[in-house]
Amino acid sequence: YVRIAQFQEHTGEDLAKLLKNLRQQNKTPLKGILLDLRNNPGGLLNAAVGVSAAFLPKGDLVVYTEGRAQDSKMHLTAVPADYLKGGGKDDYLKDLPEDIRTTPMAVLVNNGSASASEIVAGALQDHKRALIVGMQSFGKGSVQSILPMNNGTAIKMTTARYFTPNGRSIQAKGIVPDIIVDDGSDPSFVTKEADLTNHLSNPKDADANAVSKDSKPAAAPVKKPEEEKKKTSDAPSGPIEPGSKADKQFQEAMNILKGLQIIQNK
């Protein structure tokens, strides 16, 4: 079980060390890997590429960007040049046991998983490397660029969108898990990118936006008092420790991993 709270400068390197140590302690290939990206707001792009590269074959596409300007287009793959920040750094994945890349794997996400964490989940999902478990992610799939001004200030502009290897835009859509597991939280308190005023749209929403102006949104279904009461009683009374017995999503993901192990060993 590996939990990444944020993608920082040494996240990829720390993950590689942890995986190597676990493999050495186990003395045989690991039976399963559960990567927890819940409530991970993102961070450094190269760190996300490095984490993805730890589980993917060398050279596999991790993420690409599309924007109006030519210099906003990038293709980042599972190669050292794309996950090592700055030249001359030693490749921290070079000694990673090869069986790590074929170990049964699941990834946990929720509405708090955004940006870099969505890039990792999307890459592993598209390459069918891992099953994604949990709730739909936040949907932060835009690229920001800082343009310096002559007076010492700068303008931060959105210049491109992130796309998963199969061409799915993360923006305002997020990553939809292969297996939905509710965490019991009240959806009325959940905010996603698509809920924000003036958010950048998903390119596939263009057709949806062409709906007649006369059309009216469907009325929200009326919930019965007993349904509201049940939902309130099912909701967690306080913060749940990730990886604990009370962590329903974690427990379900572990059961899924056990099933993947059985299938692989047949």
Image (tube, helix red, strand yellow):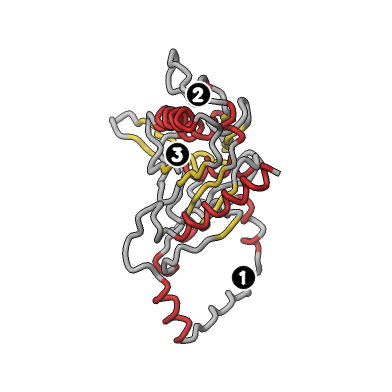
* Residue 25 can be seen, yes or no: yes
- The picture places residue 40, in percent across and down from the top left corner, at 41, 46
The answer to whether residue 199 shows anywhere in this view is no
Residue 147 location in percent, x, y?
Answer: 40, 32
Amino acid carrying mark 3 in the image: Gln
Task: Identify residue for label 1.
Answer: 213
Q: Is mark 1 on a helix, strand or loop?
A: loop
Label for residue 246? none
Q: Dot 3: within a 10 Å radius of its alpha carbon, few (fewer than 14), some, or many (20 or more) residues?
A: few
Q: Nearer the viewer, mark 2 or mark 3?
A: 2
Residue type, label 2: Leu
Numbered tag placed on residue 144 in the rendering: 3
* Apparent side of residue 190 relative to residue 49 in the rendered image (left or right): left
- Earlier in the chain: of badge 1 and badge 2, it is 2
Quarter holding the C terminus is top right
Circle 2 — which element? loop
Disc nearer the start of the sequence (2/3): 2
Q: Is 175 situated left or right of 6 in this image?
A: right
**Residue at 62% from the left image edge and 29% from the top image edge:** 57
Q: Is residue 197 above or below residue 219?
A: above
Q: How crowded is mark 2: few (under 14 residues within 10 Å), some or many (20 or more)?
A: many
- In space, the residues marked 2 and 3 are separated at their CA atoms by 28 Å
Residue 93 marker: 2
**Sequence-wise first label, 1 or 3:** 3
- Corner quadrant of residue 130: top right
Type of the residue with mark 1: Lys
Name the quarter where the N terminus is drawn: top left
Query: Residue at (42%, 73%) from the top-left corner?
Result: 234
Point 57% across, 28% down: residue: 78
81 or 142, which is in the foreground? 81
Frontmost residue, 135 versus 141: 135
| Rendering coords of residue 141 (x, y %) | 51, 45
